[in-house]
């Protein structure tokens, strides 16, 4: 029997307490210590669970020139399917081994459906065979899995119609005054999707078409056309972000919007081999695939920037290829820079871009309101192409780092699972080396702290290129002012979090809260983008 004396018990208890502290620190991560002052800096909280919030934004009036048709949803029953019965893939080390595999497949009644020469990979179909008899020392393989366009978020499942949409205000949504027709000039962007129908190519600079599907040649789902027009379309109602790019149309999904990982991998390799510098993939699947991962690595090794949609299920599950570290995973937000409830989230998210209520062409004859991370991803691809066109010496890794570093903070200060590094800010990216560029902004405002201890948290960011000293913040709640507060020095890119004392808003918790916040530069400085200085919203108690 083991006996512990009193000292031993104390020592054991002390060790357990220390271990608990370390475990809690590891679980929650480092937390900033609040400053004991009337307004303090701390770590941001989650949006309130007991109040609903509506953002005050300008809504573009509806008239005969504005589309009213939303892209329909949800998708058919195949969405979410992960396996393709009777299909698998094998990858070998050389072309010679590939010929041996072909011979073995023929002897065993297997059909070679397609190949990827750059990866020495084969897609096969047929009955299971004894792979022990394959005369190769090393090879890898796996089941072929389903890839599809993300489910269209609908009013029934995500309340999309109640969210503030971007409409035709694309320039404003990405932080620029206007769209330049030459943005992206000289850059080839591959759009891997459902293909661009022949009646939807007007206004796009199409450099070529590659059909990896082959079937349903006369049937098209215009999802690929809608994505391409957001990226580079040229039309009167609403133009794409980078109209100067050349589009390489690669069809990897069939007329019902579904496909498979092997065909997508083949499309990625084909895009790289055709000279694409940027790849957009507004599609994905929830099952990892080694052959798809290999194609993504092939693109990265050749210096190609790959952008993919994070998914529209409001889930924390990673969607592939977006979840691969070589890919820029794009979430979606609305016109008020609030995370869209349908947008997938997680630590793999790199950036967020506008993805609610964007106007785009479904066909040449029909404009639609497009929602989803499928709409957000091509905006990031367009921004990458714009940056690469303006600064062709940049590597693909540098382009990615710049887009993330010079994004605009949103949600919790710093990187978070909903916005990644922040929201796409092309204006900040293009002006990051401009001396004397002053720009302060209200980054986020929310009610946090729970019902017992609610508090208004406001974050302010310096989006300019110069140190700013003496900016003032004004906050009013139901027309009662609790500021101004003068901020100390804000370094370029720095975000400061301010909290209005709890007792100032507790008395109004049973009523609507009309909250208005504004930040201003010192009077002798000119703000380059005053539109982002102010935000306001209404918080209503949930019955």
Image (cartoon, grey):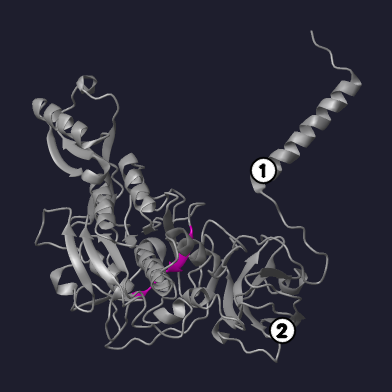
| SS at badge 1 | helix
**SS class, disc 2:** strand
User: What's the magenta region?
Assistant: 350-358
Q: Quadrant of residue 281?
A: bottom left
Residue tagged 2: 480
Residue placed most toward the observer, 481 or 273: 273
Q: For residue 444, what is the image quadrant?
A: bottom right
Q: Residue furthest bottom?
A: 524
Q: Dot 2, crowdedness within 10 Å: few (<14), some or many (≥20)? A: few
* Rendered image: mark on residue 26: 1
Residue 469 horizontal side relative to residue 147, left or right: right
Q: Residue at x 70, y 91 (%)?
A: 523
Residue drawn at x 75%, y 40% is 21
Residue 469 horizontal/vertical position (percent): 74, 80
Q: Residue at x 30, y 85 (%)?
A: 237
Quadrant of the frame with the N terminus:
top right
- Horizontally, residue 330 falls left or right of residue 110, namely right
| Magenta residue check for 456 | no
Percent position of residue 35, x then y: 80, 64
């Amino acid at each position: 029997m083991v006996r512990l004396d009193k000292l031993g018990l104390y020592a054991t208890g002390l060790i357990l307490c220390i271990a608990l502290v370390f475990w809690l620190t590891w679980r929650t991560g480092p937390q900033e210590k609040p400053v004991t002052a009337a307004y303090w800096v701390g770590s941001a909280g989650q949006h309130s669970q007991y109040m609903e919030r509506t953002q005050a934004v300008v809504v573009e009036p509806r008239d005969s020139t504005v589309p009213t048709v939303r892209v329909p949803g949800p998708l058919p029953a195949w969405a979410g399917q992960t396996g393709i019965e009777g299909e698998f893939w094998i990858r070998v080390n050389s072309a010679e081994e590939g010929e041996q595999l072909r011979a073995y497949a023929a002897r065993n009644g297997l059909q070679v459906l397609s190949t990827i020469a750059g990866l020495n990979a084969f897609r096969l179909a047929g009955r299971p065979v004894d792979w022990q008899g394959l005369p190769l020392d090393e090879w890898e393989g796996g089941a072929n899995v389903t890839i599809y366009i993300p489910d269209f978020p609908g009013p029934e499942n995500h309340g999309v119609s109640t969210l503030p949409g971007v409409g035709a205000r694309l320039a404003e949504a990405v932080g620029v005054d206007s769209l330049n027709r030459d943005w992206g000039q000289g850059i080839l962007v591959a759009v891997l999707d459902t293909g661009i129908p022949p009646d939807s190519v007007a206004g796009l600079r199409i450099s070529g078409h590659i059909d990896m599907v082959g079937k349903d040649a006369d049937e098209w789902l215009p999802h690929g056309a809608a994505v391409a027009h957001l990226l580079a379309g040229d039309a009167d109602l609403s133009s794409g972000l980078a109209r100067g790019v050349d589009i390489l149309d690669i069809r990897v999904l069939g007329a019902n919007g579904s496909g498979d990982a092997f065909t997508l991998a083949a499309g990625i390799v084909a895009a790289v081999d055709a000279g694409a510098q940027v790849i957009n993939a507004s599609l994905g699947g929830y099952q990892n695939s080694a052959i798809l991962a290999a194609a993504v690595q092939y693109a990265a090794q050749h210096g190609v920037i790959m952008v993919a949609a994070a998914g529209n299920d409001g889930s924390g599950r990673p969607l592939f290829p977006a979840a691969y570290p070589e890919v820029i995973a794009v979430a979606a937000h609305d016109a008020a820079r609030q995370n869209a409830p349908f947008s997938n989230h997680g630590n793999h998210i790199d950036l967020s871009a506008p993805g609610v209520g964007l106007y785009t062409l479904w066909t040449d004859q029909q404009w639609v309101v497009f929602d989803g991370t499928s709409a957000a991803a091509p905006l990031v691809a367009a921004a990458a192409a714009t940056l690469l066109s303006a600064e062709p010496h940049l590597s693909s890794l540098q382009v990615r780092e710049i887009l993330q570093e010079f994004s605009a903070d949103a949600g919790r200060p710093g990187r978070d699972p909903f916005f990644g590094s922040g929201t796409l800010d092309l204006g900040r990216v293009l002006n990051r080396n401009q001396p004397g560029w002053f720009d302060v902004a209200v980054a986020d405002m929310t009610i946090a702290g729970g019902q017992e201890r609610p508090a208004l948290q406001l974050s302010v960011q310096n989006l300019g290129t110069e140190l700013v000293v003496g900016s003032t913040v004004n906050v009013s709640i139901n027309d009662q002012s609790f500021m101004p507060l003068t901020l100390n020095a804000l370094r370029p890119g720095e975000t400061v979090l301010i909290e209005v004392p709890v007792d100032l808003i507790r008395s109004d918790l049973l009523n609507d809260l009309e909250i208005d916040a504004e930040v201003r530069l010192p009077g002798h400085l000119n703000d380059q983008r005053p539109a982002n200085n102010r935000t306001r919203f209404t918080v209503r108690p949930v019955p």
